[in-house]
Image (spheres, rainbow, N blue to C red):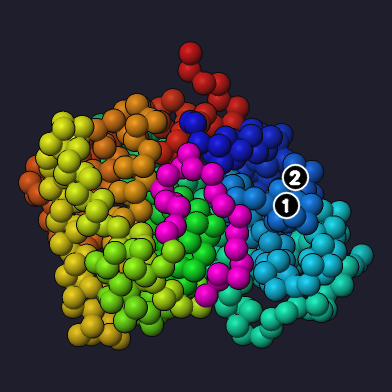
Amino acid sequence: MTHPPYELAAELDAKLGDPADPDQLFSSERFRRLERRDEFPAELCDVLDQHGLTAYYVPDQHGGRLRSHEELFQLLRTVARRDITVAVAHGTAYIQAVPTWIAAAPERAAQLGVDLLAGRRNTPEAGASTKLHGLRGVDGGHLAARSTRATGLRDGGAQLAMRSRLLTWVLDAAVSLGAVDHGLRLTLDRVFGATLHGLRLVDLPQIRRAVTEAYADLLASEAVALVATRSIQTAPDELAVVAPAASAYLRERSSELLELATELSDEEDLAKLLHDHQIVGAVCDSPLLALRCLAGQRALLTRSYGSPADTLTRPKPPAGALSAVLPPLRAEYLQLVSRSGCSLVNSLPGAVSELESLARAGVVSDQLAGSSAVLRDVAADLHDRWGDEPASLDFARRYALCFAAAACLQIWLRNYEDHEDELWTGGVWLEACLVRLLGQLRTAPVGRSETVQIAYGRLMQVMARQWRTDHHLSLFPWPLPGRPEPS
């Protein structure tokens, strides 16, 4: 693991301890007890305060440590991987603060920063019932400013709420990917450990294929989250497309993974995870709403595809280059409609050309380059045909899948030279993710069944090794808390 936001998340993960140790405050056993008592996780939120998580809700100009929304996402994902309820309970403070950060007078924003960093909170009055229904973390937020009046705002009403949503979807994304992390780990514990008629479940072809596809979904989701959260600062004027595309993709993938997990396991932790993930829609947009948002921008998206980026807008730093320093957030560029379309999806033809050059140089396989070319053609056809059926949400869903594919391409192309492990060399994870995405787009890759078998076979080996060595399942794996790194 060499990417700083992941290193930051690993530090928090280590502080929270081994979730399998019942003596740890952030243990699975503690989460079960809170669930059975319908109790708000106030003590756990206090611990997160002590570990400094709240500082990442406050921009650095107001005394906090929020300089990178990618860092914020990875920290919230780490908490959500332990327990969705706790992530929502604590992360709601960020959602409440965003309107102030983007529209308040400086003195108002500075005061809110002071309040949040001081840990001032809303807690139930003594003797009051603390039993909450649905997701116990949804109680209006763990932290609160001393004054709740929305004074000092330069903007207001529905427009401010919608502009704020261009930033607060980070919590949605963290919950979705944290659920995938947790759910896939529980699933692999089951399929690698259980047997049926003398065979391990993972040795059954259908189950082996299903969990490998789930792992490909996780890695593609990571690529989407990386590009999307970095785009908050590299392309704030395109968030009207980036946010719903990323949210729709991540939410649908996490729902599919949890459905698979419930088919293969009946663990109590999984039942709670599924329950929390279903109810978290109380604070997160549904995939349907996100898809409608994309469909509403159809004309701009189809018009901009294939146009040179510099004729549409100012040049943007590449969100996929993970070593690049992120510029500060320019809130004044937040727009409810992306007039320049989506530079990430518009980069697909150029990215495919790069991959084809790498195939000729022997860096990646011809099959990978060929599959990326198929994807390019699918994206071009989508943009051509979308105008004929403007109300179709199926086109919006396919657009979100093309967005995910473009994110995978950019993350691999901009970073593969910095990573020489088995997951990155030769584009192992990229090929499997593109094969998976083409399948979701109902299109066959180059080589058809042979390409699928080879790509998933390679990825399965990496997934099994990460699970067996007690590492997080990730593009940038690190040891699980309490499990020493193998020498």
Residue 122 among magenta residues: no
**For residue 276, side relative to residue 97 (left or right):** left
Q: Secondary structure at mark 2?
A: loop
Q: Which residues are magenta?
A: 315-335
Residue type, numbered disc 1:
Asp
Q: Identify the disc placed on residue 60.
A: 1
Determine the residue located farthest toward the top in the rendered image. 487
- Name the image quarter holding residue 430: top left
Q: Toward the viewer: 24 or 141?
A: 141
Magenta highlight on residue 319: yes
- Reply above or below: 287 against 65: below
Question: Where residue 373 appears, x then y in whole percent?
Answer: 15, 53
Vertically, is 336 above or below 486? below
Locate residue 331: give its quadrant: bottom right
Q: Position of residue 129 (x, y in %)?
A: 82, 69
Closer-to-camera residue (476/315): 315
User: Visible in this render: residue 215?
Assistant: no
Q: How many marks?
A: 2
Q: CA distance from mark 1 to mark 2?
A: 13 Å
Location of residue 338 (image quadrant): bottom left
At a point 57% along the width and 78% down the height, the residue shown is 162
Which residue has dot 2 on it? 52
Q: Position of residue 342 (x, y in %)?
A: 37, 66
Mark 1 or 2, nearer chain start: 2
Q: Nearer the viewer, residue 58 or 263?
A: 58
Residue 181 visible in the picture: yes
Which of the two residues, 409 or 183, is positioned nearer the viewer here?
Answer: 409
Residue 413: percent from the left, percent from the top? Answer: 31, 42
Q: Secondary structure at mark 1?
A: helix
